[in-house]
Image (spheres, coloured by chain):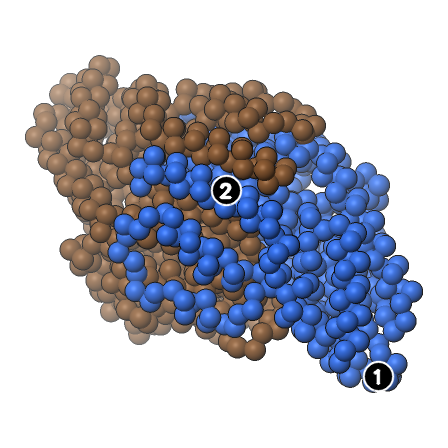
Chain colours: A blue, B brown
């Protein structure tokens, strides 16, 4: 494809993207497809090439786009806000267009240094001290794995360099709660910790926050049995019901044992942009690592996950490789981000944040987050006063967990659970709104995650009407 | 940023990208910067926002772009071809524009199913049997880590689900060679294998291919000592000197021990597109996993790394998580790619391949690869006949490893090594061409990696002139 062909096709594609955003409310939130439906529309055999970009754009519009769930839709309340601000998309396009290669400082000095500057801007905007050094990871799952491996090596005094976990011989414990994101357990297992050695600490019945005294008891029991407390993963704003584990108390318990404290604020970290929310993150300065995703509520397009570390030198010792073909031939000291994570090659992801921060700016982003907090509080209040509806977990930020209990089902928890799963499914299938069904104490509830960039109060008003209609019409 | 503002800024950015490609030869290959130079041009404090996209594009042009190494430049012969075809960039822009979220089939059915179709197209185009199932990873480093974890769990019969490596108690061995990419050792260590248990098998002196009989000896010794052979990582086309380990012989040795065989063809995998090169990949059908990077020589923009597996169900058991908030509410069976790798969230990367294959097409890509093979063979022949120059490793594909031995330095290997590092550095600093200095048997050599999309014969002719000039002018 020549640059001139790219120019023409690129202009068409940019127009298509702008037009889709303008018309987003005219589309269903969720596609009406079953597994295999999209694949069946595509040829089994590879193409021969030579097609005009316009033909592909036609297929993108008619075959592919109708098969995505529109997470940018203002009636999308599922999972978490997966905002992709148009400003950050521009940064993504710039990154693709530059087509540079991040395998070392030398392979793209600007890629490394813009990332250093931008993650430091983000540190400053979220009120973190200058003791933190940051890096962009793809997702918080990967960031957690990186933290777990760092924790493993700190607890074993770099056993990987000698006889490893097999030779270490003592149980290595990881502590978290059942409310922690599924990626936490996955990360611990992938890092080589044993399922038998992962401790799920009891949580408060209503808030679902970790109980620090139970953590202390468990650590004591494990140490008495000869185990080593390697890591504690603290959720600040869990994905499910926005639980905030009591970090200062956890730090107090963990300090004598020197376990690695990783803070998973993947979803809620955006709230650190708001000074009035920072009390929720108290104690964070005493942690070893912190990860959160601008690619969620803040709105930097996926994949933009921030990982901050207190002691990056430890991570570099764990992760570094330095074969001759990657050795820098430049004189000075340069950051080599390949030693801050798993992949060698990296994209120029910093441009996504660079564009978003310069175009939208912190103030506009903060206003939007405050709007969402207001909307969630308003929505929860509407639910509270509605007969037969409950808010089933504290509304710490922008997620409202709700349950409908029709009078005739009262006392029958199985029937209530089934009813809630049923109306959520029917509502989702309608394409008019999308909520995540979730479970709490073994029963189905509905999570309303407020915070899509385009979601305004009137969309929540509309959601209330849909709830009445779908939950009321069994 | 509104869709209309995005439209205007997007058009400007597309033009900028097209113009940069048109003018690429007018720029130096390598920026003339020292560590810290780029960061010093950027504000320390975060921006206030509200800037016009044109101001950012101005800074992109004047502050950022001059700080990247131009890996798309036809005089770039460093590391490996990191081609970013404009067709695949269009696919990347389409992915960003769709802004969909891959955390489950349901969150974006098309994202999952287009990926399934496209990785199967790639399987077919590379002559692999239908026994393979594929997935896109970010890089081959990550793919290797995924393979090492899968190997670990197969060798230990899913020890992670019980008492893990700590409880396993027997040494778990990984076999590879010193020629394997640095990411192989890193992956093994991150997966929890011990440095003491990683075996670097001897290689042939000239070709640098693994010696299968030495592998057999080492495995026997390890098994006799109570160890478990967990994995063998076979390089097919190593990054350094394009070593091809003898896969059929390795398979023969490994079979009785059931160790996982992972084939790392990150760089050279593109050659599987050429039927006449497939003999180099003989035996691949007997491996357990295979990874290669379309984002290298083939030219799909980073990050597009393919991982193929014989038994994806095993990987899914190792990697899966299924909390209630991710449970699919659809009826049928759907692929959940989150269980095929580390991150939960994924971008719609399949569109990069979809665009490239439909626009450029397999034939055009194959012609380009053949051109590069011809150019590399021609260039090696020119070096061979030049006085004082050596080709120091077999030219298996498109990488030519060379050394200049001036008559007055003959016999002084230290001086020869220093001389070669010196002229490569001076040439690279000139910005006229870029080669990777590399080491072979402890001495510096130069790697000429042919294969940038725009590199034609006359660029190699020009490189020969530069070699004479820089190596001759100490």
Relative to B441, residue A474 above or below: below
Please report whichever mark, 2 or 1, sits nearer to the chain's N-terminal start.
2
Residue B102 is left or right of residue A362, and the answer is: left
| Neighbour tally class for label 2: few under 14, some 14-19, many 20 plus, Cα within 10 Å | some
Q: Which label number is shown at residue A409? A: 1
Relative to B76, residue B193 above or below: below
Tell which tag, 2 or 1, sits nearer the viewer. 2
- Residue at 73% of width from left, 58% of height from top? A449
* Residue A144 in picture, x, y percent from top left: 61, 53
Q: Which residue is mark 2?
A: A15
Q: Chain of mark 2?
A: A
Q: Nearer the viewer, residue A75 or B144?
A: A75
Residue A227 is left or right of residue A5, and the answer is: right
Image quadrant in which the C terminus of chain B is located: top left
- Residue at 13% of width from left, 21% of height from top? B407
Q: Secondary structure at mark 1?
A: helix
Image quadrant in which the N terminus of chain B is located: top right
Q: Are marks 2 and 1 on the same chain?
A: yes
Q: Chain of mark 1?
A: A
* Residue B115 in picture, x, y percent from top left: 43, 60
Quarter where residue A114 is shown? top right
Q: Secondary structure at mark 2?
A: helix
| Neighbour tally class for label 1: few under 14, some 14-19, many 20 plus, Cα within 10 Å | some
Quarter where residue A27 is shown? bottom right
Q: Which label number is shown at residue A462? A: none
């Amino acid at each position: 494809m020549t640059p001139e062909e790219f120019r023409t096709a690129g202009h068409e594609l940019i127009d298509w993207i702008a037009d889709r955003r303008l018309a987003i409310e005219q589309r269903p939130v969720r596609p009406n497809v079953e597994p295999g439906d999209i694949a069946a529309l595509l040829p089994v055999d590879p193409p021969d090439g030579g097609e005009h970009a316009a033909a592909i754009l036609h297929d993108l519009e008619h075959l592919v786009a109708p098969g995505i769930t529109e997470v940018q839709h203002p009636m999308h309340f599922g999972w978490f806000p997966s905002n992709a601000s148009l400003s950050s998309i521009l940064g993504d396009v710039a990154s693709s267009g530059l087509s540079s290669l991040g395998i070392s400082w030398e392979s793209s000095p600007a890629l490394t240094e813009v990332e250093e500057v931008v993650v430091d801007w983000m540190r400053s905007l979220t009120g973190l001290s200058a003791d933190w050094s940051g890096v962009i990871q793809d997702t918080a799952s990967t960031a957690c794995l990186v933290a777990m491996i760092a924790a493993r090596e700190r607890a074993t005094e770099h056993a990987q360099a000698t006889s490893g976990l097999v030779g270490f011989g003592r149980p290595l414990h990881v502590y978290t709660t059942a409310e922690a994101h599924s990626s936490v357990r996955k990360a611990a297992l992938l890092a080589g910790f044993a399922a038998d050695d992962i401790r799920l600490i009891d949580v408060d019945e209503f808030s679902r926050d970790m109980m620090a005294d139970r953590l202390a008891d468990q650590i004591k029991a494990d140490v008495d049995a000869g185990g080593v407390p390697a890591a504690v993963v603290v959720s600040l704003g869990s994905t499910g019901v926005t639980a905030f584990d009591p970090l200062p108390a956890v730090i107090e318990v963990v300090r004598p044992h020197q376990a690695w404290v990783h803070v998973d604020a993947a979803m809620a970290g955006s709230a650190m942009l708001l000074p009035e929310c920072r009390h929720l993150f108290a104690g964070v300065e005493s942690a070893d690592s912190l990860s959160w995703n601008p690619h969620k509520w803040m709105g930097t397009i996926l994949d933009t996950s921030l990982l901050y570390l207190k002691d990056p030198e430890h991570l570099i010792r764990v992760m570094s490789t330095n074969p001759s073909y990657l050795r820098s031939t430049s004189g000075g000291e340069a950051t080599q981000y390949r030693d801050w994570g798993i992949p060698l090659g990296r994209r120029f992801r910093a441009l996504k944040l660079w564009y978003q921060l310069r175009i939208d700016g912190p103030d506009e982003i903060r206003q939007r987050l405050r709007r969402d907090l207001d909307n969630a509080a308003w929505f929860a209040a509407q639910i509270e006063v509605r007969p037969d509806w409950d808010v089933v977990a504290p509304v710490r930020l922008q997620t409202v967990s709700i349950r409908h209990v029709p009078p005739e089902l009262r006392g029958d928890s199985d029937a209530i659970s089934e009813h809630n799963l049923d109306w959520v499914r029917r509502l989702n299938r309608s394409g008019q709104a999308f909520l995540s069904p979730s479970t709490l104490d073994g029963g189905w509830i509905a999570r309303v995650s407020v915070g899509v960039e385009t979601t305004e109060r009137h969309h929540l008003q509309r959601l209330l009407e849909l709830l009445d209609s779908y939950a009321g019409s069994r």
